[in-house]
Image (cartoon, rainbow, N blue to C red):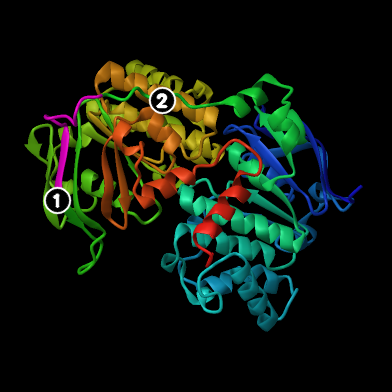
Amino acid sequence: MAETLLKITDLEIKAGEQTIVEKVSLTLQKGRVLGLIGESGAGKSTIGLASLGYSRDGLRITGGRAELNGIDILALRGSDSRRLRGAAVTYVAQSAAAAFNPAHPLIDQVIEATLWHGLMSRRDAVARAKELFALLGLPDPQNFGDRYPHQASGGQLQRAMTAMALCPHPELIVFDEPTTALDVTTQIEVLAAIKQAIEKTGTSALYISHDLAVVAQVADEILVLRHGRMVEHGSVDRIFNAPQQDYTRQLVSMRQSEKPAEASPIAAEPLLSITDVEAGYTAGTTVLKGITLEIGRGETLAVVGESGSGKSTLARVVTGLLPAAKGSLHFDGQVLPGDLGSRSREILRDIQIVNQIPDLALNPRQTVEAILARPLAFYFGLRGPELDRRVTALLDHVELAKTMRGRYPSELSGGQKQRICIARALAAEPKLIICDEPTSALDPLVAEGILGLLTRLQQESGTSYLFITHDLAIVRAIADTVAVMLDGNLVRYGRKSEVLAPPFDPYTEKLIASVPEMRPGWLDAAIARRRLDNPAL
């Protein structure tokens, strides 16, 4: 039997009087990968951070042990704890874009912890980093580290953070949702790079995710969590083929519903019309190239494509945050001013957005109650008991307890913060909601509930959605029309039944083939197919 590296026994963590993690125990052998799977708020990230001897602000470790090579890391203090983190145990965050310092080259940040711990000379650390860049499939590995964070894509930054974690030769890496915000084509590349790096270095890992299909591709065993408690633990094969608990069976068998496809043509009298729009961020650059789209009243347009295809730029144009250089926009039968400052309060209320990264969208100094109360007071003038009632109703709509009202964003999980963003958009009762990856941080079961909520709202109020996503399962569940974008161009556009049916153009076929399937070994087969099609990979 392999030697035990990490042993957590009866771990208990609280936020105030609320128990976040309740008597969780696990064991990880050297050279193995344990997947932690569960919905938002299940305690996955909290357990992962406890494996580094760390807890977030507002949380208290109130019981249990976490032993690394027999040493209880929860009992370490001060310099003893600092010597552990970044050396024996390292961490890969969910959002690499938010984790890197924009003012420093990547190479300096990748080797920083290694140098701080005195594990290598700078020359050796740089050489180690370049080896890892090559192992992780980063472009021009000898010079990639000279780039600044803004000069790398999201997928490249995620792999650079993996290189940072591997650089000091750690015994344990905690991967905290490392592919959640990535499009499906980039996700395959990052997953394959992580799996190969773990196998070649022999490093042990905790892999945290809400996506069982993703976890199954890199893990040897899976621990299923819910509401801070362990639901089930076993090998990947057993979890998939013989799950013991109802919740696990739901995760394995879950298939998102599909919105019926309409046979009618694209609406003749749309709510939003975008005609020949071009836009860029600097003079002489064009990100959007002649985009023409329509969104019908009470319909959903899903915009799909890989990172950098122009999806979020299109959203910025519609919201007025980025005026179009060419083309025109019409909303509700009127010309839509291109600049946000030129729009009336009524137009501002009618067009709302749910951002992809809630950490950047929520004011960290405001409570949940203040965040949700502001649009209610600003647009409808609500005060007193009626305002209080509407805040509670919004929390109920997005399946959050009213006890969340007094919390700050830092005291919420990623999925909970995402749901607050959705509730804030719903508060304005808009005609159009731009949804920029609103379910990317949610586990499939909770995401399905949020999609159901959006669908019910659409049926009740006729709200339209511009839904930006990289998840084709979500497209099938919620879309009426679909636009596929690549390098700022439309490569495929029409009713869902037409766009998602063969014959496909090469890019749409690649997108569909990149959607993770709920079976072990899918990643290996997908990578083998890619190498067959392109031997240079």
Q: Residues within 10 Å of mark 2 (few under 14, many from 20)?
A: few
Q: Which mark identifies residue 258?
A: 2
Residue 268 among those drawn in magenta:
yes
Image x and y of residue 66, in percent: 81, 44
Image x and y of residue 467, in percent: 33, 37
Image x and y of residue 77, in percent: 78, 54
Q: CA distance from mark 2 to mark 1?
A: 31 Å
The residue tagged 1 is: 276
Give the magenta-colored segment's residue range: 263-276
425, above or below 123, in the image: above
Query: Residue at (59%, 70%) from the top-left corner?
Result: 133
Q: Residues within 10 Å of mark 1 (few under 14, many from 20)?
A: some
Q: Is residue 348 left or right of residue 434?
A: left
Residue 192 among those drawn in magenta:
no
Q: Are marks 2 and 1 in contact (CB under 8 Å)?
A: no
Dominant secondary structure of the magenta stretch?
loop
Dot 1 amino acid type: Asp
* Quadrant location of the C terminus in the rendered image: bottom right
Q: Nearer the viewer, residue 441 or 422?
A: 441
Label 2 element class: loop
Image x and y of residue 109, in percent: 57, 69
150, above or below 358, in the image: below
Dot 2 amino acid type: Glu
